[in-house]
């Protein structure tokens, strides 16, 4: 899936890059992998009301990614947060 993903600069202390990398036990590659995977399960975050996907990474983690859709065409997403999640049925 052709998805553009927006990351803030790594030195922006308030940006999504720092927020996701610091203490969430996921990598940027894992977040992008789940956002681009058409088999990821899409839902809505109960706490924020934003779109959210759950999916497996090639590293074997099952993660959740909360994001904003910035543009529809081309599809452009801004990850807000990401974290390991319990796998379905687990």
Image (cartoon, grey):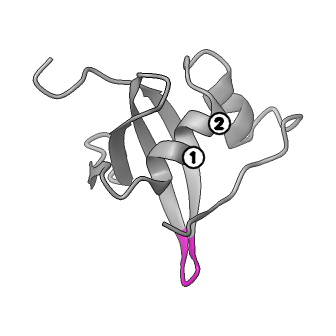
Describe residue 1's horizontal placement relative to residue 70 as left or right.
left
Which one is nearer the viewer's eye here, 56 or 64? 56
The reply to whether dot 1 and dot 2 touch (C-beta < 8 Å) is yes
Determine the residue positioned at 38% across, 54% down: 50
Residue located at (25% from left, 42% from top) = 46
Query: Does residue 52 sit above or below 90 in this rendering?
Result: below
Q: Is residue 84 left or right of residue 39?
A: right
* Residue at point 56%, 66% (across, down): 3
Displayed quadrant of residue 23: top right
Residue 8 shown in magenta: no
Pointer 2 local density, CA inside 10 Å: few below 14, some 14–19, many at least 20: few
Residue 42 at least partly seen = yes
Residue highlighted by disc 2: 28
Farthest-out residue, front? 58
Q: Main secondary structure of the magenta part?
A: strand
- The magenta segment: 70-75
Quadrant containing the C terminus is top left
Which residue extends farthest right? 11
**Residue under label 1:** 32
Image coordinates of residue 71 in percent, x first then y, are 56, 77
- Is the residue marked by circle 1 packed among few (<14), some (14-19), or many (20+) residues within 10 Å? some
Q: Nearer the viewer, residue 53 or 56?
A: 56
Q: CA distance from mark 1 to mark 2?
A: 6 Å
Count of all numbered marks drawn on residues in the image: 2
Q: Which mark is residue 46?
A: none
Question: Outermost residue toward the bottom?
Answer: 73
Q: Position of residue 43 (x, y in %)?
A: 25, 52
């Amino acid at each position: 899936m052709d998805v553009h993903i927006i990351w803030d600069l790594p030195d922006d202390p308030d940006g999504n890059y720092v927020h996701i990398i610091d203490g969430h036990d996921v990598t940027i590659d894992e977040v992008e992998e789940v956002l681009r995977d058409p088999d990821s399960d899409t839902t809505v975050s109960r706490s924020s009301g934003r779109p959210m996907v759950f999916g497996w990474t090639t590293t074997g983690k099952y993660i959740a990614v909360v994001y904003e859709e910035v543009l529809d065409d081309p599809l452009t997403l801004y990850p807000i947060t990401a974290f390991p999640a319990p796998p379905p049925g687990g």
